[in-house]
Image: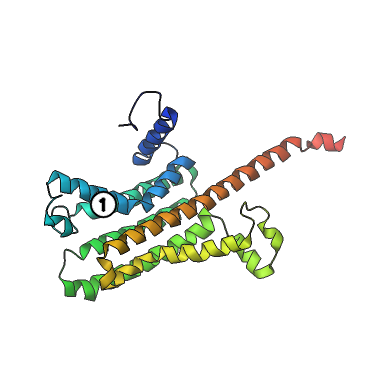
């Protein structure tokens, strides 16, 4: 109610900006701006939260809140529900179509590669949901290996994209090869150990899906909560370095424009 309130209170301009961004994410019909894909990226980390909200709403609608059905998987609101994978995949589809829109506007092939990254999450989600709709022996012998392969591909692809594209830490190649301290000069977080830490922690947190391989952890509510919280931490960490990279790009562009303005023309140099 507060979010939709038209009264000038509780940061009206910020609330309307958020709603407008949500609308642009849902319908990427205009040119994609930084807030559009930045917020959509954050939503991909909240897909589990969205699925839990859908499940809770479904329980309340079907009056299953105060019954033992809350703890059981069922065909209406539990793990067997087809709505769960659809809600999980929705944020990734939004980013996928944003990438296609960016490619339409810029013709940059990196947009297609980014779209491919988000598409790798689709088989992970639906193969995981398929477990509740096939016989156990079929799942173990056929679908589980496919799920493992798709999960590894998605994790490694996403990790590479975080480091190389979103954070633009390709500079680390020069640091490791030449041990050049000045290579850190254009990074806001100047201590090198911060970047070594973020590389290792991001890779580990990208692979937290492996807890599903353990039968005694897969259905443990505390474990699921902890993994979800760790994904929020990973995304919070991603935000810092993504904003830093964007700031560096803006600063470099401004410096280039300023240097172009003060550069003498050809006729002035001849004089």
Residue 147 in the image, given as x and y percentages of width and height: 30, 68
From the viewer's side, name the closer residue of 157 and 105: 157
Locate residue 155: give its quadrant. bottom left
Residue where numbered disc 1 is placed: 52
Instruction: Left or right? Give the position of 178 relative to 6.
Output: right
- Using the rendered image of the protein, determine whether residue 190 is visible from the camera's viewpoint: yes
The total number of labels drawn is: 1
Q: How is the image coloured?
A: rainbow
Q: Is residue 4 above or below residue 116?
A: above
Query: Residue at point 77% right, 38% down?
Result: 263
- Residue sitting farthest toward the right: 271
From the viewer's side, name the closer residue of 100 and 207: 207
Q: Is residue 137 above or below residue 103?
A: below
Residue 97 in the image, given as x and y percentages of width and height: 37, 46
How packed is label 1: few (under 14 Cα within 10 Å), some, or many (20 or more)? Answer: some
Query: Residue at point 32% right, 70% down?
Result: 148
> Can you say which quadrant of the picture contains the N terminus?
top left
Residue 244 in the image, given as x and y percentages of width and height: 57, 49
Element on which disc 1 rests: helix
> Can you say which quadrant of the picture contains the C terminus?
top right
From the viewer's side, name the closer residue of 76 and 225: 225
- Using the rendered image of the protein, determine whether residue 123 is visible from the camera's viewpoint: no
Query: Residue at point 44% right, 57% down?
Result: 234
Residue 135 in the image, given as x and y percentages of width and height: 15, 70
């Amino acid at each position: 109610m507060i979010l939709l309130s038209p009264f000038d209170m509780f940061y009206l301009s910020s609330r309307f900006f958020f709603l407008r961004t949500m609308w642009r994410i849902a319908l990427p019909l205009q040119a994609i701006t930084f807030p559009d894909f930045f917020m959509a990226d954050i939503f991909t980390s909240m897909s589990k939260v969205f699925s839990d909200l859908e499940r809770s709403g479904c329980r309340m609608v079907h009056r299953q809140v105060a019954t033992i059905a809350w703890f059981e998987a069922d065909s209406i609101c539990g793990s067997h529900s087809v709505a769960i994978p659809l809600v999980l995949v929705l944020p990734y589809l939004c980013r996928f179509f944003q990438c296609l829109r960016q490619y339409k506007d810029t013709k940059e092939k990196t947009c297609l590669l980014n779209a491919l990254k988000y598409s790798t999450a689709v088989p992970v989600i639906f193969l995981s949901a398929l477990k509740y709709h096939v016989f156990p022996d079929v799942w173990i012998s056929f679908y589980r290996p496919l799920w493992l392969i798709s999960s590894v591909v998605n994790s490694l692809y996403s990790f590479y994209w975080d480091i190389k594209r979103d954070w633009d830490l390709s500079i680390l190649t020069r640091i490791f090869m030449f041990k050049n301290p000045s290579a850190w000069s254009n990074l806001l977080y100047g201590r090198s150990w911060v970047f070594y830490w973020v590389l290792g922690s991001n890779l580990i947190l990208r692979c937290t899906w492996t807890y599903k391989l353990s039968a005694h952890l897969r259905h443990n509510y505390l474990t699921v909560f902890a993994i979800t919280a760790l994904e929020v931490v990973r995304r919070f960490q991603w935000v810092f370095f993504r904003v830093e990279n964007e700031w560096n790009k803006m600063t470099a562009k401004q410096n280039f424009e300023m240097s172009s303005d003060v550069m003498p023309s050809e006729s002035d140099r001849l004089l």
